[in-house]
Amino acid sequence: MALSKANRLKSRQDFNAVYRKGRRQRSRHLTLVIQRRLATEVPKHHHKLNSSTTVAIALEPTRVGISISQKVSKRAVVRNRIKRWLRVAARLLLPRFPTGWDMIVIVHPEATQCDYRQFLQELEQLLINAEVCDGH
């Protein structure tokens, strides 16, 4: 099952912004580039007689993007399998993420020897090392 649309990092501009400003964490098979997004302010109207317009902070969902080049494998079947495994791993870990982060998972060529469990463990460890989620 895929990530929800709200949790996908899709546009080139968003990817470039994370690459430019994000922090990097590297493991044997993956690199995590992560950046905190600024919260947006949304005006909220109350219908009380004596209250004026107030401002609330919108909690933006954490977005995940996956980058896998042909250096990993020339075969699209292999690259797509790795992307599916990473999406499932991200979806399982998503409830532990705080809101408002953009992250890109970059796959290294050595990742073709990994299975799903290794991806899940490495991604979780990268997130803990980046201090995005706790180790519990």
Image (cartoon, grey):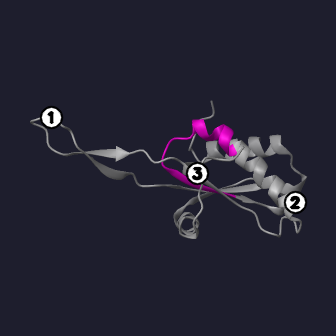
Q: Residue 49: percent from the left, percent from the top?
A: 10, 35
Q: Given the image, on which type of amino acid does mark 1 rest? A: Lys
Q: Residue 93: percent from the left, percent from the top?
A: 65, 39
Q: Residue at x 56, y 44 (%)?
A: 132
Question: Of callouts 2 and 1, which one flags the residue occurring earlier in the amino acid sequence?
Answer: 1
Considering the numbered disc 1 on the image, is that residue within a helix, a strand or a loop?
Answer: loop
What residue span does the magenta drawing correspond to? 90-105
Quarter of the C terminus within the rendering: top right
Q: Which mark is residue 103?
A: none
Q: Residue at x 14, y 43 (%)?
A: 52
Q: Which residue is mark 3?
A: 5
Q: Which residue is mark 1?
A: 48
The answer to whether 76 appears left or right of 93 in the picture is: right
Rounded to the nearest whole Å, what is the CA distance between mark 2 and mark 1? 58 Å
In the image, residue 72 lies in the stretch drawn in magenta? no
Q: Given the image, on which type of amino acid does mark 2 rest? A: Val
Quarter of the N terminus within the rendering: top right
